[in-house]
Image (spheres, rainbow, N blue to C red):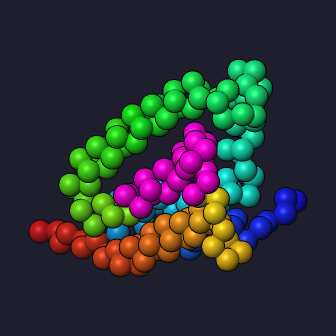
């Protein structure tokens, strides 16, 4: 069993709240709530398992890259370009599909932000890491951001209004 630190605890708390309340919202309203609940549950698992860190070490081994940031620059830039393209496409799809269900738009945006935090960690640019891994009390900034994303997603899910049932004629 891996040791859980305060930063991971903050992220787990936020994303677990989001998963629970998005799942509950799925029972009241049609839309992406069940998928969002699964997404946040997966993020909880990711925080515990640390797959993103294993992925970075594996990529370094495959490409024969050292631990120096300058050695990884081409791979980082390629990963950054791919992730930015994916983020733009997801944001476009979110706005396009959310037009039919505007109540779910904020929830989808928060999920994109949460995914962006993990993507920023995977790309691992030195200046970004220096900011995200700065400690604020016993928790790194990224832990506070994870907690904020989870709590905001939970609040949005709690506010999801029940879908009205159509009356049959």
**Where on the picture, by quarter, is residue 15?**
bottom right
Q: How far across and how far down the image is residue 42, in percent?
A: 61, 54
In the figure, is residue 55 to the left or right of 158? right
- Say above or below: 54 vs 142: above
Where residue 165 sits: x, y (%)? Answer: 24, 71
Q: Position of residue 26 (x, y in %)?
A: 43, 67
Residue 109 makes an appearance in the image? yes
Is residue 35 highlighted in magenta?
no
In the image, what residue occupies the spot 75% across and 40% down? 54
- What secondary structure is the stretch in magenta mostly built from? helix
Q: Give the tally of numbered discs.
A: 0
Q: Quadrant of residue 166?
A: bottom left
- Residue 21 visible at all: no
The image shows residue 6, relative to residue 53, as above or below, that is below
- Residue 121 lies within the magenta run: yes
Of 64 and 159, nearer the camera is: 64
Q: Is residue 129 left or right of residue 51?
A: left
What residue do we see at 23% from left, 47% from top? 96
Which residue is pictured at 71% across the width and 75% down the height?
Answer: 138
Give, as a single range, the part of the protein colored magenta: 108-131
Q: Residue furthest top?
A: 63
């Amino acid at each position: 069993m891996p040791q859980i630190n305060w930063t991971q605890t903050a992220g787990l708390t936020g994303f677990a709240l989001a998963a629970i309340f998005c799942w509950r919202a799925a029972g009241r309203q049609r839309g992406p709530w069940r998928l969002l609940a699964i997404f946040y549950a997966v993020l909880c698992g990711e925080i515990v398992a640390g797959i993103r860190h294993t992925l970075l070490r594996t990529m370094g081994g495959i490409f024969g890259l050292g631990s120096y940031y300058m050695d990884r620059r081409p791979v980082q830039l390629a990963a950054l370009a791919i992730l930015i393209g994916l983020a733009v496409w997801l944001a476009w799809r979110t706005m396009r599909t959310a037009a039919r269900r505007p109540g779910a738009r904020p929830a989808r945006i928060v999920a994109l932000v949460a995914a962006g935090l993990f993507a920023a960690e995977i790309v691992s640019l030195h200046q970004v890491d220096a900011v995200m891994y700065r400690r604020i009390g016993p928790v790194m900034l990224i832990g506070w951001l994870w907690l904020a994303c989870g709590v905001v997603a939970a609040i949005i899910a709690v506010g999801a209004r029940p879908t009205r049932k159509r009356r049959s004629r």
